[in-house]
Amino acid sequence: MQQIHPFLWFEGQAEEAMNFYVSIFPNSKVIKVMRYGDAGPGPKGAVMLCVFELDGQVFNALNGRPAGFGFSDAVSFTVNCETQAEVDRFWDALVAGGGQHSQCGWLRDKFGVAWQVTPIQIRDTVGGDDPAGARRAMEAMMQMTKLDIAKLEKAYAGE
């Protein structure tokens, strides 16, 4: 069992969020749904905590009382993608149903959780060894919402 895993606080949407995420990521599953009993503090039978796995990473999702915490970009989840098709698939799935596009591969899903859908090629473009190429790739990336591998590679190469 992993010692460290994310714990997300929802205001009544934990089970819906869990099912949404499990439907998007391969090798994912619901581990357990815990419900309130007679002791509360929520209504008996209501979902209290969902434990699930997204491609090997365990998450907890709590239905906490409304606290106004919300989610912010200060904590986000990165999805590393090997191909543009993967970038497109994860991007489209995560923004579906009311998510919001942001800049440089960032987005918020319909629950407000921040994600970065990132091609692994960013290491060789924005993080490349050629300072001029890395600068061009960074400038190109700053103009993007969803990241485009071909455009990053062309910018790095100076094309």
Image: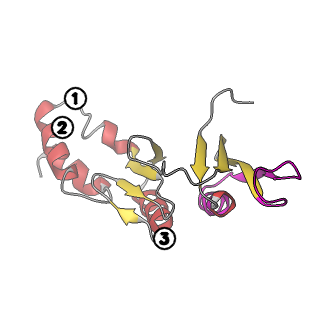
Task: Write the residue at 25% across / 41% down.
Answer: 125
Closer to the N terminus: mark 1 or mark 3?
Answer: 3
Is 108 drawn above or below residue 82 in the view shown? below
**Amino acid type at image mark 1:** Asp
Return the residue at label 2.
134
Q: Position of residue 97 (x, y in %)?
A: 50, 73
Q: Is residue 16 left or right of residue 110?
A: right
Q: Position of residue 141 (x, y in %)?
A: 22, 50
Residue that extends furthest to the right in the rendered view of this protein: 38
Q: Amino acid at mark 2?
A: Ala
Of helix, strand and loop, which one carries label 2? helix
Does the magenta run of residues contain 40?
yes
Viewport quadrant of the N terminus:
top right
Q: In this rendering, which labeled residue sits more in front, label 3 or label 2? A: 3
- Name the residue carrying label 3: 96
Q: Position of residue 132 (x, y in %)?
A: 10, 35
Magenta stretch in the rendered image: 17-46
Q: Secondary structure at mark 1?
A: loop
Mark seen at residue 146: none
Specify the quadrant of the image occupied by residue 131.
Answer: top left
* Residues marked 1 and 2 touching at CB (< 8 Å): yes
